[in-house]
Amino acid sequence: MRVPSMASPKHIHFIGICGTAMGSTAVALRALGHTISGSDNQVYPPMSDVLRDAGITVTEGYNPENLPLQADVFVVGNAISRGNSELEALLEKKLPYVSMAEMLKREVIQGKRSFVVSGTHGKTTTTTMLAWIYEHAGKNPGFMIGGVPENFESGARFTHSDLFVIEGDEYDTAYFDKRSKFLHYLPECAIVNNIEFDHADIFRDLDEILLSFQRFLNTVPRNGLVLINGDDPNCLTLRAKCPAPLKTVGLGPTCDYRITITGVTPETTQFEINGAAFEVPMVGEFNARNAAMCVCAARFAGLSDEEIRAGLSSFRGIRRRQQECGTAHGITIIDDFGHHPTAIRETLRGLRQRYEGRRLWALFEPRSNTSRRNVLQNELIEALTEADGSVIAAVANPEKVAADQRLDTAKVAQSVTARGKPCWFESSTDDIVNRLKQETHSGDVIVVFSNGGFDGIHDKLLKSL
């Protein structure tokens, strides 16, 4: 079945519209003049605000009555599964439906120069940075970002430019298509930032993840380019079977494009790539790596180093990525989307650069499918020791994880404390706020790590402190 052409106005209904990718796509299609409707049971900022500002009404909760029978096509989000009342009604009525990834492939990406950014960490930042470099150079790129970028009005935009930049997620596509989403995105240039075990709900082990990435690289044409992290052993395993030209990017001496960190300030990181100097207005080695990938991809697209430097210098980042929420009595609250131990570790290390000499606190909510499990428990302990003190919240929806597979939050707190960094497990939001109110003082920085709303804890901390 082919999706109705996007060339003429259509009515498109999104089931699961508040997912970052789904919501951004909905806003971009609304901007093209399409009628958009949608529903979700997780309606909270920033995506709820973005949808509202675009004039899209979101129905909270899933019900058969939400389905507009006059709609031309229904997009089923990858969080939707059988048993969902709205989906069941869709199937019973034999209405036309697709996954978001398939719709993007057929109606947006086909025929364009597709730049697909993949990897366990850094996808959203790198995708946004690359799209902005093209935008600043006047290329008017299309893009789809799984977050809310500060440089653009929304996370997705579909244009007539031949350049399209998209965040390539390895997560599965939909309940009816268990392939990774990035297999739909027709990459001319594929970026692989890093590869670690994640998404424990759909991948049994690292080998399954590597197989999916290998299949992703198999979709790159011979006149394309693959850029991989040359310092990541898991990425390097992909080289032997890659049918397209492949270059390594990293700090190691054997990398084709070698990164050298040349200077840091509380707000910027300077680096060179094989002797060519660049600067990114972000902190930490991790963001220098993201920027280096963008430099190499933008060169492949035909941009000059001068154009790339100008784009990097004006990049403003992503909401919920090391974003200051406010300061109360000298205590600064930072919001960050990090939920994998590596992301937590690298964010804390980068924030040391920004807040030099200040005590750094980590507050972590185990909410993602992987972080609720104990598969990376030791890695989480290591990550939290990067902070001067930390608090771990209760596992979200613990009933969805078997007891013997569930993260042991009390043990995490005990183990971190045993390593000389005080850590507490607190079972409720109020207890967390009270704990941090007791333990913190003026000059401290609290980083809230969560990939959800976390019961509005950011505002609660600011009011309490």
Image: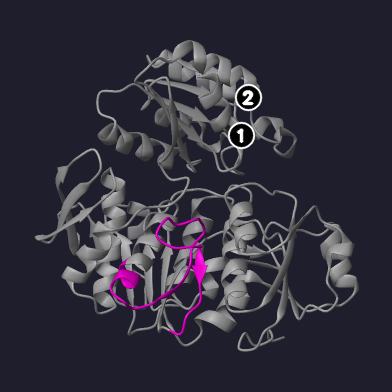
Question: Dividing the picture into quarters, in which one does residue 235 lie?
Answer: bottom left
Q: From the viewer's perspective, tell me whether residue 365 is left or right of residue 421.
A: right
Mark 2 and mark 1 in contact? Answer it, CB < 8 Å. yes
Q: From the viewer's perspective, tell me whether residue 230 is left or right of residue 342.
A: left
Q: Nearer the viewer, residue 29 or 77?
A: 29
The picture places residue 36, in percent across and down from the top left corner, at 70, 71
Question: Dividing the picture into quarters, in which one does residue 217 lie?
Answer: bottom left
Q: Residue at x 64, y 33 (%)?
A: 455
In the displayed structure, 4 sits above or below 352; it is below
Q: Residue at x 19, y 63 (%)?
A: 257
- The residue most toward the top is 438
Kind of residue indicated by mark 2: Thr
- Residue 257, numbered circle: none
Q: Is residue 205 visible?
A: yes
Name the magenta segment's main secondary structure.
Answer: loop
The picture places residue 425, in percent across and down from the top left corner, at 57, 19
Whichever of callouts 2 and 1 sits on the residue coming sooner in the sequence is: 2
Q: Is residue 238 visible?
A: no
Q: From the viewer's perspective, tell me whether residue 79 is left or right of residue 184.
A: right
The picture places residue 464, in percent across and down from the top left corner, at 55, 20
Q: Which residue is mark 2?
A: 429
The residue stretch that appears in magenta = 133-160
**Circle 1: element type:** helix
Q: Quadrant of the N terminus?
A: bottom right
Q: Which residue is mark 1?
A: 456
Q: Residue at x 40, y 61 (%)?
A: 128
Taking the magenta stretch, the answer to whether it contains residue 139 is yes
